[in-house]
Image (tube, grey):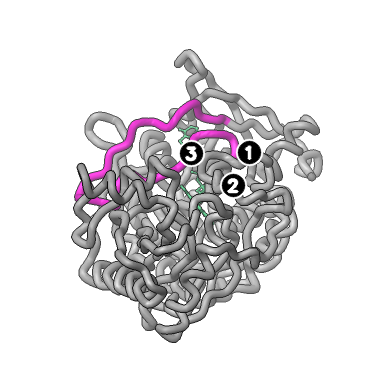
Amino acid sequence: MLIAVVPPTQRPRSISNGGPGRPAGSASAGGTTAINTKVALRPAGHDYAKWHAATGLLNDRGQTFSEPDLRPYLERVEGRLGVRERSDWQRCVHTVVPGFRALGAELEPVRSYTDHNCMRCGSCLQGCPTNAGKNTLNTFIQPALAEGRLELRADCEARRILVADRGAGPEATGVEYTGPGGEPHLAEADVVVVAAGALGTPGLLIRSGLGELPAGRHIGAHLGFHPARIVMGEFDEVQDAHMVYPITAHCMQFARDSEGGFIVEASTVQDPIGFATALSDSRDVPLWGEPLTEALRRYRYFTGLLALVNDENNGTAGVGADGQDRFTFSFSEQEMERIGRALVFARDVLEASGAKRVLQTPVLSTHLQGSCRMGSDPGRSAVTARAESHDVRRLFVADGSVVPRTLSVNPSLTIMALAERLADYLLTGDHGYFRQQAASLAR
Ligand SMILES: Cc1cc2nc3c(=O)[nH]c(=O)nc-3n(C[C@H](O)[C@H](O)[C@H](O)COP(=O)(O)OP(=O)(O)OC[C@H]3O[C@@H](n4cnc5c(N)ncnc54)[C@H](O)[C@@H]3O)c2cc1C
């Protein structure tokens, strides 16, 4: 039987060093996939090359980990989620096509995990009202729950991984968690898989004592933000870029660091409240008073480009003196240059498309990765190439924190594929960790 501990609400979090706003995520079964945009992109070849360079990541045969090693799992996840191409571009996308062309770039349809019940209502980030948006809750978790293979402990929070030395070195033996009323519970387990996200996992492991062990210095280090912003142009014609499936097109031409180090996704604006609270001028100064009111009156006339930038994983996720999760970030000069290049490109596209004025959000982050990175070199990673702690056997990580370097694409498909790969490994039983046959867990 699998037991999953599911949190009640997002815990308070703080970020220092002027990082990219408040990092966004969700607290629910299904995690952030329950409220994300559902763009489904595979890692590029250059992403895998960065992984190996960062942590010496090898495949099962001891060779450099590369695209064929993840492909079967990506395909499996894509099949389960019903990934399809979105070529149903609406006016707000067609508006910016000439701008991309004028700059020698092309848009192409994205792939996404949304089925044909998507009515383009623009509610992805509030939770899909028709379940057209697939996520780990309605594709992976619900069937297992309905078939009795999974027990969810809802409104609970994992506080500590139990670790004991039973003669073979430190091993995970279970989880200590609090229930809905804050009361303490213990769950014993043959294997513990932590999936609290790139912000939550490091704190949980550090509070469990793993920070003191040899690979502990990599727990919470190397946090990547995949910094982004929405750059919005105001046009003469109504765009209604909030009443669409938010991202149906993208431009990948500049994805490599040597070519710019950013991708651009089109076209959307945030919901009215998100739009109003993030709208800033070209110096990142938030709009206020009359200029804000005036821009809001023109809400329906804006369309926006989401520019996402490769970063160098310079952030940290740890535990402060007060025992709370704590995050830091400082952009290097190189990262700032890329962020600047992406902004200029997006502005140029909008202006070349006929925008009367261009506004922007500050730098945001929704693609957190890398804070417990996987690798074959224990001197450079927190978990093994199998996503098992280098220091504590039977303890695995299955979330964005294991991604060795920030991807140049939206990360959720990769995170799910890595989790699928881990599930396969656990099911083989080769590790000898299960008291019962792994086959009884088989899907
Ligand atoms: C607005 C938005 C849009 C996005 N759009 C896309 C997109 O279009 N395509 C894409 O690929 N990616 C997208 N992403 C990113 C993607 O959704 C995430 O990268 C991915 O879901 C992260 O998965 P994860 O398992 O690492 O963490 P999460 O999905 O964040 O899951 C971690 C879960 O663990 C819970 N948790 C934390 N601590 C504890 C604890 N102590 N006890 C119990 N539970 C705990 C958290 O509350 C959360 O539910 C988007 C993200 C956001 C915020």
Residue at (47, 82) in percent of width and height: 101
Q: SS of the residue at dot 1?
A: loop
Residue at (61, 32) in percent of width and height: 4
Where does the C terminus fall, quadrant-wise?
A: top right
Alpha carbons under labels 3 and 2: distance apart: 20 Å
Residue at (37, 47) in percent of width and height: 275
Disc 2 residue crowd, few under 14, some 14–19, many 20+, Cα 10 Å: some
For marks 3 and 2 on the same chain, the one whose residue lies earlier in the sequence:
3
- Residue 129 has which mark? 1
Q: Position of residue 428 (x, y in %)?
A: 74, 52
The residue wearing badge 3 is: 26
Residue 232 drawn in magenta: no
The part of the image, by quadrant, that contains residue 305 is bottom left
For marks 3 and 1 on the same chain, the one whose residue lies earlier in the sequence:
3
> Would you place residue 112 above or below residue 119 in this image?
below
Do labels 1 and 2 touch, CB within 8 Å? yes
Q: Where is residue 197 in the image (x, y as percent from the top left)?
A: 47, 45
Q: Is residue 264 left or right of residue 437?
A: left
Q: SS of the residue at dot 2?
A: loop
- Amino acid type at mark 1: Pro
> Which residue in the rendered view is the most extreme toward the bottom?
104
Residue 7 drawn in magenta: yes
- Residue 337 has which mark? none
- Residue 121 has which mark? 2
